[in-house]
Image (cartoon, rainbow, N blue to C red):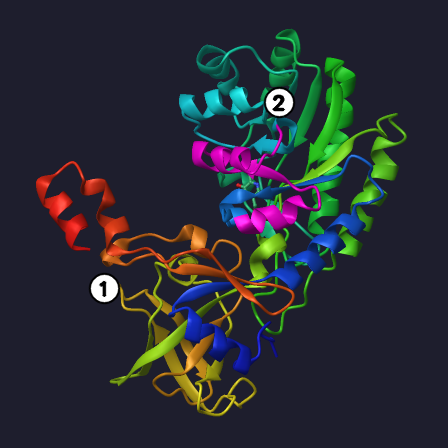
């Protein structure tokens, strides 16, 4: 059984303050997980997690991670601005972009962020649009082919748009060296949402061995290896969670076996986790507003795919707990006696949070918790069908709550029409 981080009574109270739908975040859970990550890699003095801002760009949440020394992994100008506004110093900003616009490279250079080059052609492009190559640089590797782990998990780097071939990587290191770079990093992201303790250690072996060869053949100093993101979370109740201590230990063994004997024991380990840092510590709180019985039974809720796109986009599973309502029973542990599709209101038939899901009897007005929306949840939101983005609420460790992003209003939605008379009329009406 998958547990919610709030009780039914707590949730009823919170939903009296903040109209549904909203994303709710668990500060205590974020902190405990952050501490586990820090401890798992404490064997590496240079370790730093660069939180993947795209997973959840809320500054209040990133500020919590910052307390533990997290940097930011950014991929666009707006994400760089968030890091800068939070006072993140340049070396603690990783700029891991692809297909990068000139303006983004320029801002990354101005902020002193570490630029992680996705392609060899970006090196002359960067020089042209942003200026001289910085002293610290990084390159993204794509080994091609298929990437497999013992438990059958695999991904297809050969079909992915990211990174450089091995040959290009050697060439890029030489180019950057000849243009004055002094400290080099190596980065790869080979599989997403891996629910296994083997992914980081296997990736580390590949990157460590490559780092040794790169250092030998190009004479550069490799300062860090960036394992990027990809550490997964158990979205399904029957999946085992990753053990970050075992993952850190697996990386340490690879480090001792490969880097230490090569006299590269000073290499810092960087990570860019997003999902693992926040995914389980957020949920989407929504209310049942309709029940419809045709060829199947549908529960219509007041959230939609614009609040959480993963089910519509990837067919992703998100667990749902039916909590009930203020004056009704706590349904969170009720047996699943019904089968429903749980839908949002977009005019798209893929706007379903769950299909043929076994759930307890749902009544109109019941609060539902859609689990694991802390990463790639709100941040993937959009405005299709004129739907407005929801609020975000932080549940503090002491049980109090804080609004950390208000819900969008129609005026926000119309704001960019201010160039038209009818747009200004809409904004005035909203
Ligand atoms: C998306 C992304 C991440 C974060 O991935 P998670 O699976 O959320 O951990 C990290 N680095 C880069 C370059 C990414 O694109």
Residue 69 covered by magenta stretch: yes
Q: Does 395 sit left or right of 428 as displayed?
A: right
Whether residues under marks 2 and 1 lie with C-beta atoms below 8 angstroms apart, the answer is: no
Q: Residues within 10 Å of mark 2 (few under 14, many from 20)?
A: many
Q: Residue at x 85, y 44 (%)?
A: 253
Q: Does 211 sit left or right of 74 as displayed?
A: right
> Which element carries disc 1, helix, strand or loop?
loop
Question: Which quadrant of the rendered structure holds the C terminus?
Answer: bottom left
Question: Which quadrant of the rendered structure holds the N terminus?
Answer: bottom right
The disc placed on residue 169 is 2
Seen from the viewer's position, the closer of residues 301 and 230 is 301
Could you say where residue 36 lies in the image, as x and y percent from the top left?
Answer: 75, 55
Could you say where residue 222 lies in the image, as x and y percent from the top left?
Answer: 74, 23
Magenta span of residues: 60-89
Could you say where residue 29 lies in the image, as x and y percent from the top left?
Answer: 65, 63
Count numbered badges in the picture: 2
Asked if residue 308 shows in the view, the reply is no
* Quarter of the image where one finds residue 254: top right
* Residue at the limit of the structure toward the right, as seen here: 261
Q: Which residue is mark 1?
A: 347
* Residue at the limit of the structure toward the left, as seen here: 421
Q: Residue at x 68, y 46 (%)?
A: 67
Seen from the viewer's position, the closer of residues 239 and 144 is 239
Q: Residue at x 79, y 46 (%)?
A: 41
């Amino acid at each position: 059984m998958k547990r919610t981080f709030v009780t039914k009574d707590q949730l009823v109270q919170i939903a009296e303050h903040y109209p549904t739908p909203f994303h709710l975040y668990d500060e205590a859970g974020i902190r405990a997980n952050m501490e586990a990550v820090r401890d798992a890699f404490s064997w590496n003095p240079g370790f730093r997690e660069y939180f993947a801002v795209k997973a959840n760009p809320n500054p209040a949440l990133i500020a919590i991670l910052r307390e533990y020394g997290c940097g930011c992994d950014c991929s666009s100008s707006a994400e760089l601005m968030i890091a800068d506004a939070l006072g993140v110093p340049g070396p603690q900003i990783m700029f891991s972009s692809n297909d990068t616009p000139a303006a983004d490279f320029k801002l990354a250079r101005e902020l002193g962020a570490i630029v992680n080059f996705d392609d060899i052609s970006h090196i002359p492009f960067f020089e042209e649009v942003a200026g001289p190559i910085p002293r610290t640089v990084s390159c993204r590797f794509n080994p091609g082919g298929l990437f497999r782990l013992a438990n059958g998990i695999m991904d297809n780097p050969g079909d992915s748009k990211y990174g450089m071939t091995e040959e290009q990587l050697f060439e890029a290191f030489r180019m950057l060296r000849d243009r004055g770079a002094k400290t080099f990093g190596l980065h790869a992201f080979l599989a997403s949402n891996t629910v296994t303790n083997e992914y980081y250690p296997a990736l580390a072996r590949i990157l460590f061995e490559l780092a040794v060869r790169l250092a030998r053949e190009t004479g550069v100093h490799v300062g860090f290896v960036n394992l990027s993101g990809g550490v997964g979370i158990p979205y399904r109740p029957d999946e085992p969670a990753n053990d970050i201590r075992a993952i850190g230990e697996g990386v340490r063994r690879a480090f001792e076996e490969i880097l230490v004997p090569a006299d590269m024991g000073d290499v810092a380990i960087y990570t860019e986790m997003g999902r693992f840092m926040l995914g389980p510590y957020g949920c989407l709180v929504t209310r049942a507003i309709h029940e419809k019985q045709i060829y199947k039974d549908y529960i219509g809720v007041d959230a939609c795919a614009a609040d959480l796109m993963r089910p519509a986009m990837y067919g992703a599973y998100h667990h749902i707990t039916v909590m009930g309502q203020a004056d009704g029973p706590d349904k969170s542990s009720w047996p699943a006696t019904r089968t429903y599709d749980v839908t949002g209101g977009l005019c798209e038939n893929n706007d379903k949070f769950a299909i043929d899901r076994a759930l307890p009897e749902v009544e109109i007005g019941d609060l539902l918790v859609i689990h694991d929306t802390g990463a790639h949840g709100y941040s993937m939101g959009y405005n299709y069908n004129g739907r407005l983005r929801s609020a975000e609420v932080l549940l503090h460790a002491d049980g109090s709550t804080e609004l950390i992003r208000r819900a969008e209003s129609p005026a926000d939605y119309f704001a960019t029409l201010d160039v038209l008379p009818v747009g200004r009329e809409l904004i005035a009406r909203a």
